[in-house]
């Protein structure tokens, strides 16, 4: 069970990390367009 929780937590952490990178890239692209 502990391994499953660690796996799910790691998966969620990776998803949040990817979302943050996408948002940062989107903001940078908007600044470049302006």
Image: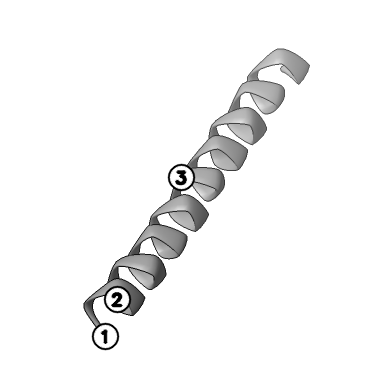
Q: Position of residue 5 (x, y in %)?
A: 29, 76
- Label number found at residue 17: 3
Q: Is residue 22 left or right of residue 8?
A: right
Q: At 46% across and 45% down in the image, what residue appears?
A: 17
Q: Earlier in the sequence, mark 1 or mark 3?
A: 1
Viewer-nearest of discs 3 and 2: 2
Residue 33 tag number = none
* Image color mode: one colour
Residue at image mark 1: 1
Nearer mark to the viewer, of 1 and 3: 1
Q: Please say if 6 is above or below 25.
A: below
Residue visible at 26% across and 85% down?
Answer: 1
Q: Provide the secondary structure element on which disc 1 rests.
A: loop
SS under mark 3 = helix
Q: Alpha-carbon neighbours of circle 3 within 10 Å: few (<14), some, or many (≥20)? A: few
Q: Is residue 18 above or below residue 34?
A: below
Image quadrant in which the C terminus is located: top right
Percent coordinates x, y for residue 3 in the rendering: 30, 73
| Crowdedness near tag 1: few (<14), some (14–19) or many (≥20) residues, C-alpha within 10 Å | few
Locate residue 12 relative to residue 21 in the image: left or right. left
Q: 4 or 25: which is nearer to us? A: 4
- Contact (Cβ within 8 Å) of mark 2 with mark 1: yes
Q: Quadrant of residue 32?
A: top right
Q: In the shown orientation, is residue 13 left or right of residue 28?
A: left
Callout 1–callout 3 Cβ contact below 8 Å: no
- What is the number of the mark on residue 5? 2
């Amino acid at each position: 069970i502990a391994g499953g929780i660690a796996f799910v937590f790691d998966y969620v952490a990776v998803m949040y990390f990817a979302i943050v990178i996408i948002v940062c890239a989107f903001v940078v692209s908007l600044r470049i367009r302006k």
